Amino acid sequence: MYEPAAVSGNDSEASTRRTTSAPEGPAQEDQPQAAGESGTTSAAQRPGPRGALKGGPGSLELTPEEKARVEELRAADAAVRAHEMAHIMAGGQYIIRRANFSFVIGPDGKLYAVGGEVQIDTSPVPDDPEATIQKAQAVRRAALAPSNPSPADLRVAAEATRMEFEARMELARQRAEETQMQAGEYNQEGGMITPQPAPVLANLFA
């Protein structure tokens, strides 16, 4: 997840998100759209470069401030996409949904990603603590894969660590029961019968 110095989810999944500084225009998720009643926009409706309005038809002249803002947005776009790709590459089979981006319109009229998220499955594997341990480790690697994990990424990593700890406790309990079963027998009610020592035999003489 790419968010400001800041994976939402339920019991079975989590997502990560991070946004940059104040957007130039309204942030959008999923499909890049400009604001409108229907949620869609045509080429005629989409705001063009501000420089084009100032300089006349076809002009792409931007002010120094606008040029600086465009460079800032380009850098943010690249960082957002790299951040989410790191999650996806590390998350592998546990990624539920590919990257979902939020966009703003820059001074040049182009769309730039300023936030993003992916969803990853953080549910334990039922009745299989060993598989749960492996999954928790993979989820933690995915959450911490970007070079600058967000606070949400760190929360997902902490949740994965907790899941691994609980799975290890369950695995230890199962192995302890297996050891007890090898050392003794269980009656039909589930109670353990302690093996009785063999009797010591002696010959009696009259």
Image (cartoon, rainbow, N blue to C red):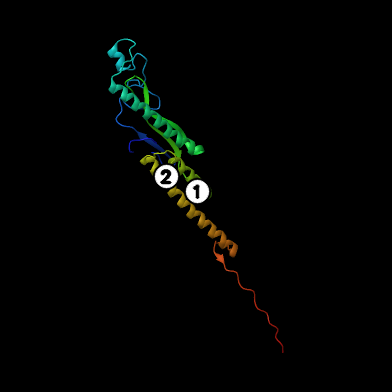
Residue at which label 2 appears? 157
Q: Amino acid at mark 1?
A: Ile
Which quadrant of the figure contains the N terminus? Answer: top left
Q: Which residue appears at 46% of the width and 42% of the height?
A: 141
Is there any visible trace of residue 18 in the rendered image? yes
Position of residue 201 relative to residue 117, above or below, is: below
Residue 189, image x, y percentages = 55, 62
Question: Helix, strand or loop at disc 1?
Answer: helix
Position of 129 compared to 159: left or right? right
Q: Which mark is residue 133?
A: 1
Position of 67 compared to 177: left or right? left
Cβ atoms at labels 2 and 1 below 8 Å apart:
no
Residue 22, image x, y percentages = 29, 30
Q: Earlier in the sequence, mark 2 or mark 1?
A: 1
Q: Which residue appears at 36% of the width and 41% of the height?
A: 151
Which quadrant of the figure contains the C terminus? Answer: bottom right
Q: Nearer the viewer, residue 100 or 83?
A: 83
Label 2 Cα crowd, 10 Å radius (few <14 / some 14-19 / many 20+): many
Give the farthest residue toward the front: 64
Q: Which residue appears at 59% of the width and 65% of the height?
A: 183
Q: Quadrant of residue 5?
A: top left
Q: Nearer the viewer, residue 111 or 75?
A: 75
Is there any visible trace of residue 188 in the rendered image? no
Q: Quadrant of residue 143?
A: top left
Give the farthest residue toward the top: 57
Label 1 Cα crowd, 10 Å radius (few <14 / some 14-19 / many 20+): many
Residue 74, image x, y percentages = 37, 26
